[in-house]
Structures are given as C-alpha cells and as structure tokens.
C-alpha cells in the first residue's frame, strides 16, 4: 500500500462522509416514477392496443408453423457470402428487417408508425450519413468516426465503415480502451413525410454472430457468438418486439431509461439457444469494457411463411354460421381452394385454423349452428387497426393493396417495415389487404373493425 | 409504463420486500458512492433513486441484489458523466467545493476518465476486489487493474505538478 493509495482512501472516506443523503420513503419514490413494473422478462402486452392480442397470435403462429411451413432462416455476420452489388454485407440489405430507429418501446414498427401518424422525426434519418451517425451514437457509448460510405441512391442502399480509438491525449493519459471498428448498413424506407433511412444491420470486425432460426411449435434462435482474442467482454441482447429475452448471461444493469435492457454479459465463444415469440427478433451484441465500444446487430425474420393478422377483436367477417369449417374458410378467401387438411384446434382457445392455398390461413370460431370466420392471416403481413389509418407491416418488400369497406383500394410499397395507409375505417367495416410478393406469390389478410 | 399506486394499500405492498429492504438499508451508502463518482450530491441522490426504480423491473432475475443496484448506480453515474461531457464539449467540471478547500486529490479525481474514476472509487472507497469491480463496470479484471494503475499514475502526476 503506497502513500498515494492511503491518501486516496482517506480522501474518499472524508468526502463521502460530507454527504447527508435524504432518502425519500419508498412509497413516495415509486409514486413519482418512472417505474418499470416488477414483471418477469420478457414481458409483453399492455403497451399498446395492437399487442393486446399478440399472445394469442403467437400461439396461432406456432401451430401454423407445423401446418403450413417450417423453414429455417439463417443470418450470419461473417462476411464472404455477400450478394452481388451490396459490397461486403453479411446479409441482404435489400430485404433484411430494419433494426433502427426505434420507438420508446424499442420496436421499429412502432417508430415508423409514430412517424407516419405524427410527422415527427425523433432522429435525423433524412440522409444515410446522418442516420448512420445517429445510430452509432445511440448504440455505442464511445465517440466513433464514420468513414466514407458506399451509397447507392438508385437501389436505396448504403453502408459506412466506422472506427473508434481513444484519444491518447485525453484525460487519464494513455488509452486503456481497445480500438474497435465495423460497418453499418442502411436501406431507404418510404414514409408519409418522405424518405427515411433505416439501419438494417451492423457488424463489429472483432465479433462474429451466426443466427439460425427454426420455426415449429416452439420457435427458437440459435446464436453462435465468436470474438477475437483482443475483443472485450460481450453484452448480448435478444429482443422480441423491443422486449428482452433472457439468454442465460449475467444481466448488465441499466444505464438509463431509454433502453429496456443493456444486455447480458456472455463470454465468447458462446452458443446460445433461446425460444422466441413469433415475429422479427433483433440480436444485438456489443463489446463492453465499462462502456459500449461496438455494435453487431441484425434482425432475424420469422421462420414460418405465414403470419397472422392481429385481429382487433373477433368480429366475424360474416356473422352467418356455416356448417362446414372448410367451406367457411373457402368462402372467406378469394382464389385458391381451402386445404384438405383437418381443421386445426388451437390449444387453450376456441379458435380453429384452416389453411387456404400457400399464403393464407383462415381463423374460425365455433359458434352455435356452425362456424364463423374471425380473420384471415397472410404471409408476412400484420394489419393493425386504427381509426384513421391502417398499418401494414411486412418483413420483406412487396406491393400491398389495401381496401377498406367498399372504397377504392390503395396501393402501397412495403419495404420490410411498417407502412401506414391513411384510410379512415368505420366501425364494422372490413379491411382487406392483398400483397403481391416479388417471388410471384400473393397473400390475403382481412379483419373487421370492431 | 408507469405505476402509480391507487387505493388505500401502501405502495410497498406491491414491491418485493427485499427490494424495499435493500433500498432502506443501503440507500445512503449508494448515494455516497454516486457522489464520489459524479461530484454532485443532488445528482447522486437522483441517480440512486432512478437505479432502484429501474432495478425493480429486472428484480425477479437478479442474483446478487446489492451488486446489481450498485452496478446500476455506477453505470448511471458514468452515463451522466459522458452526457455532461458531450453537452459541454469539454472535460467534466471538477467536483463541487473543489476550489473552497483546494483538495488537490479530489480535483485530480475529477479529471480522470470515467472508468478510471469508477475503478478507483470502487477499490479505495468501496473496498471491492478486482473481480467485483469488473462485474460492476462490465469489463475484464485485467482492464480494472490497468485502469487503476493508470489512474494512480495520473493522480500522482497531477499532485506532483
């Protein structure tokens, strides 16, 4: 023990003794908020009307994965499998789900919905350069330098390299932070107020994250996290709809109120397998050495080919019961004939499913006298109700036609994020959404406004 | 999401007893710790209160409650320091009352980078081992040792001027 250490210890004790804390009673403290409810993670629901039915939809999706399709999806940040024209992207920036900007609850869809409704722009995402800088400032604590980027205005794609190296002349003398570097990818997203640039992925040169998603009754993500020997500790976050899913690491305590979770400390190499709800899952891995030094982030699309309408309520599309459920399903969807499979019971609910074609599934409810159709689900489409708009979210680009009631349909371009269609919907009106996908398929979704 | 108690039942009834107990028992300690990290008693109180409120959301999964809240306080203090630094575009101001009693060591502490300052406070005020400091700061033990070594060198250099 040196004199200096003794001096530091004495000085700190004396300074601490000068403070007279004024502890408010706990009741007063929680009354002033903000407070996060003491609920197990990942907590879902109760945040906005759309999510009120999310739990049911998850259950529906799980069964559908067996009924219709079960296609694994894989995302890997290791370079060298880049599609032509997108530089060294480890995924396809043209179709990857956006991961930023996010709203207060962390969901990309919510942010874009907010922008469409309020015409507000919480972050400057008007150019790819500004969006990249804003994203890195949001995700990384240290001041990174954004390098000269690769911007393809025609394709609406961009990527930028970034680096961080602590200033050796800064406070504290020689740097004790390691240098980090990486790249961030962006895609132009059309919104009501104009174009916005969304981040669709980022990598840290020292960290490799491979993700394999599997559908089925229990959708899972398998993460393989590798890092170089010089990399610092890793904080891993797996988020579904902005809510963290535990990955088995040590929780990293919150550093602020703007992030629901900072991640869990995981030692690389790590192999992580977690169950996830249906939907886009965001995987975020950051080097953390007292501060977030880097970011690797990607969105993993759902594995099943079908997704399901988030029905505002179970108002039947046609309240007249039909004796045969398959016949009822066939009448609800134009075009293809309903599948011959038996009606699927959804455990824990009074709902039943019938697959129609390859891109739609009808949700029915048994009522006295037969069956009523309460909704039609479609691949990659989430219709959300609203009094003055219909929100259509999609994990892949496509062309959607939205018809409300008997009015003229509107055509909107889907870019892998939510798009708000400003169509007032009256009580009881039927909203129909038809999506033409680039691969030639067509999906159909419908629900009745409550 | 906000939680404002309603009805006559005390709000404490809605919260884990060990959380409220920890708050009662260790609040003062954590405020003093936060004060040493920020140099501001008012900011310290605010950070500790926010840390407890935020910790309540993760409480069912916390293995070591005191270590968790302490780390949350340290992280919040460091985030606050970085924010102040960015807002002012200059190094953090020296701690309060620095000019009044000309405490060179206290002033020099305020000029350390945020990780070094946190490591020094946790080691010499908190009495934490390297492993515990590493857990609180979210870094490796070797990084803690390096930070403290460089911090002491910087402090010595400052007071020798």
Image (cartoon, rainbow, N blue to C red):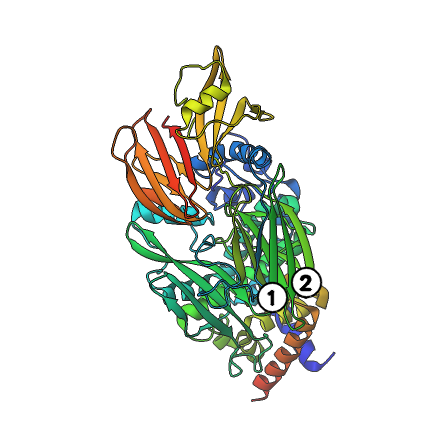
Within 10 angstroms of label 2, few (less than 14), some, or many (20 or more) residues? some
Name the spot of residue A150 as percent of width and height, x first: 41, 70
Image disc number at residue B92 = none
Q: In which quadrant of the rendered view does residue A288 lie? A: bottom right
Of residues B27 and A428, which is closer to you in this image? A428
Q: Compute the Cα span from label 1 to label 2.
A: 9 Å
Q: Earlier in the sequence, mark 1 or mark 2?
A: 1
Asked which secondary structure carries label 2, the reply is loop
- Tell me what residue is drawn at x 52 percent, y 68 percent: B39
Q: Is residue A245 visible?
A: yes
Q: Is residue B28 visible?
A: no
Disc 1: which residue: A207
Mark 2 belongs to chain: A
Name the spot of residue A283 as percent of width and height, x first: 56, 54
Disc 2: which residue: A268
- Tell me what residue is drawn at x 46 percent, y 24 percent: A329
Name the spot of residue B124 as percent of width and height, x first: 67, 70
Quadrant of the rendering where the N terminus of chain A is positioned: bottom right
In the image: residue B132, left or right of residue A447: right
Of residues A249 and B119, which is closer to you in this image? A249
Asked which secondary structure carries label 1, the reply is strand
- Circles 1, 2 touching at the beta carbon (< 8 Å): yes
Q: In which quadrant of the rendered view does residue A407 lie? A: top left
Within 10 angstroms of label 1, few (less than 14), some, or many (20 or more) residues? many
In the image: residue A423, left or right of residue A259: left
Give the farthest residue toward the right.
Answer: A1
Q: In which quadrant of the rendered view does residue A159 lie? A: bottom left
Question: A294 above or below A283?
Answer: below
- Tell me what residue is drawn at x 33 percent, y 43 percent: A420
Circles 1 and 2 on the same chain: yes
- Tell me what residue is drawn at x 45 percent, y 54 percent: A95
């Amino acid at each position: 023990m040196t004199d200096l250490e003794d001096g530091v210890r004495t000085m700190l004790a004396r300074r601490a003794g000068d403070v007279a804390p004024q502890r408010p009673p706990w009741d007063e403290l929680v009354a002033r908020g903000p407070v996060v409810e003491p609920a197990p993670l990942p907590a879902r629901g109760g945040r906005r009307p759309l999510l009120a039915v999310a739990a049911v939809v998850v259950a529906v999706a799980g069964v559908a994965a067996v009924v219709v399709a079960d296609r694994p999806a894989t995302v890997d940040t290791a370079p060298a499998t880049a599609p032509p024209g997108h530089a060294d992207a480890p995924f396809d920036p043209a179709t990857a789900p956006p991961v930023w900007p996010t709203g207060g609850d962390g969901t990309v869809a919510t942010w874009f919905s907010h922008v469409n409704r309020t015409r507000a722009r919480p972050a400057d995402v008007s150019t790819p350069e500004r969006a990249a800088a804003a994203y890195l400032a949001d995700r990384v604590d240290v001041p990174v330098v954004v390098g000269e980027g690769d911007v393809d205005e025609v394709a609406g794609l961009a990527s930028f390299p970034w680096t961080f190296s602590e200033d050796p002349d800064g406070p504290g003398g020689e740097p004790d932070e390691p240098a980090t570097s990486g790249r961030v990818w962006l895609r132009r997203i059309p919104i009501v107020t104009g174009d916005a640039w969304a981040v669709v992925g980022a990598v840290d040169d020292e960290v490799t994250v491979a993700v394999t998603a599997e559908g089925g009754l229990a959708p899972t993500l398998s993460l393989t996290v590798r890092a170089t020997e010089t990399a610092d500790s890793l904080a891993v976050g797996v988020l579904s709809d902005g809510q963290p899913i535990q990955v088995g690491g040590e929780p990293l305590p919150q550093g602020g109120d703007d992030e629901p979770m900072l991640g869990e400390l995981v030692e690389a190499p790590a192999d992580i397998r977690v169950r996830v709800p249906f939907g886009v899952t965001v995987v975020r891995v950051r080097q953390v050495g007292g501060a977030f030094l880097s970011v690797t982030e990607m969105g993993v699309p759902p594995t099943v080919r079908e997704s399901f309408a988030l029905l505002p309520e179970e108002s039947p599309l046609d309240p007249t019961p039909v004796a045969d459920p398959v016949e009822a399903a066939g009448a609800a969807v134009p075009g293809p004939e309903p599948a011959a499979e038996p009606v699927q019971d959804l455990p824990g609910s009074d709902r039943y499913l019938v697959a129609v074609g390859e891109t739609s599934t009808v949700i029915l409810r048994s009522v006295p006298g037969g069956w009523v159709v309460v909704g039609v689900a479609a691949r990659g489409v989430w219709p959300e109700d609203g009094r003055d708009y219909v929100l259509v979210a999609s994990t892949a680009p496509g062309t959607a036609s939205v018809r409300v009631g008997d009015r003229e349909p509107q055509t909107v371009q889907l870019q892998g994020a939510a798009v708000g269609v400003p169509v007032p919907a009256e009580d009881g009106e039927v909203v129909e959404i038809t999506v033409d996908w680039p691969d030639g398929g067509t999906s159909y979704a419908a629900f009745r406004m409550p | 999401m906000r939680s404002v108690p309603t009805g006559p039942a005390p709000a404490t009834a809605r919260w884990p007893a060990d959380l409220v107990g920890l708050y009662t028992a260790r609040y003062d300690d954590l405020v003093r710790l936060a004060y040493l990290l920020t140099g501001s008693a008012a900011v310290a109180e605010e950070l500790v209160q926010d840390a407890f409120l935020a910790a309540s959301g993760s409480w069912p999964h916390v293995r070591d409650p005191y270590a968790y809240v302490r780390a949350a306080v340290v992280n919040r203090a460091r985030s606050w320091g970085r924010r102040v630094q960015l807002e002012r575009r200059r190094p953090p101001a020296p701690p309060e009352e620095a000019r009044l009693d000309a405490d060179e060591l206290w002033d020099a502490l305020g000029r350390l980078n945020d990780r070094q300052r946190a490591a020094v406070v946790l080691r010499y005020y908190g009495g934490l081992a390297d492993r515990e400091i590493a857990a609180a700061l979210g870094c490796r033990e070797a990084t803690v040792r390096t930070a403290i070594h460089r911090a002491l060198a910087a402090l010595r250099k400052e007071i020798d001027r």
